[in-house]
Image (spheres, rainbow, N blue to C red):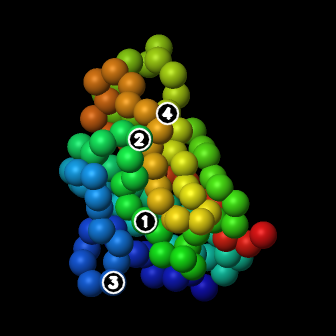
């Protein structure tokens, strides 16, 4: 059975957005773990500082090794480089690595393992 979805920025014990990041209009930034130890991260974040983290994952949701995956940006020039998202296995920070052109938001649709 999957964990329930955890919504970033919803208060209580859930992680908060940092560095001016917020959920894009009409989207939530959420994560949960499945029965195999895979974390499903979904949503779109906007308005933050590229190169600085969006939020920090709780220890139980951190990858077993550093993760770097391709993503996509909204309102970006399609002829520019493809952005990446990094997730630290030690700190749990979720970091968009570059802003390209006039991009306003970045996708966080990622699945990774917490198992070694």
The earlier-in-sequence mark between 2 and 3 is: 3
Name the residue tied to disc 4: 83
Residue mark closest to the camera, 2 vs 3: 2
Tell whether label 1 touches label 2 (CB within 8 Å). no
The earlier-in-sequence mark between 4 and 1 is: 1
Distance from the alpha carbon under mark 4 to that under mark 3? 30 Å
- The crowding category of the residue bearing disc 1, from other C-alpha atoms within 10 Å (few below 14, some 14 to 19, many at least 20), is many
Res 27 → quadrant: bottom left
Distance from the alpha carbon under mark 2 to that under mark 1? 14 Å
Name the residue tied to disc 1: 56
Distance from the alpha carbon under mark 2 to that under mark 3? 25 Å
Can see residue 78? yes
Residue mark closest to the camera, 4 vs 2: 2
- Secondary structure of residue under mark 3: loop
Please name the residue shown 29% across and 58% down the image.
18
Please name the residue shown 43% across and 33% down the image.
98
Name the residue tied to disc 3: 13
Instruction: Give me the disc on residue 42.
Output: none
């Amino acid at each position: 059975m999957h964990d329930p979805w955890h919504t970033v920025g919803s208060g209580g014990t859930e992680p908060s957005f940092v560095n001016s990041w917020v959920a894009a209009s009409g989207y939530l930034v959420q994560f949960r773990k499945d029965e195999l130890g895979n974390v499903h991260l979904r949503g779109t974040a906007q308005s933050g500082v590229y190169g600085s983290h969006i939020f920090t994952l709780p220890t139980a949701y951190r990858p077993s090794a550093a993760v770097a995956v391709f993503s996509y940006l909204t309102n970006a020039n399609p002829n520019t480089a493809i952005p990446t998202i990094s997730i630290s296995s030690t700190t749990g920070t979720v970091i968009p690595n570059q802003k390209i052109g006039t991009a306003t938001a970045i996708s966080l649709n990622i699945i990774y393992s917490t198992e070694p």
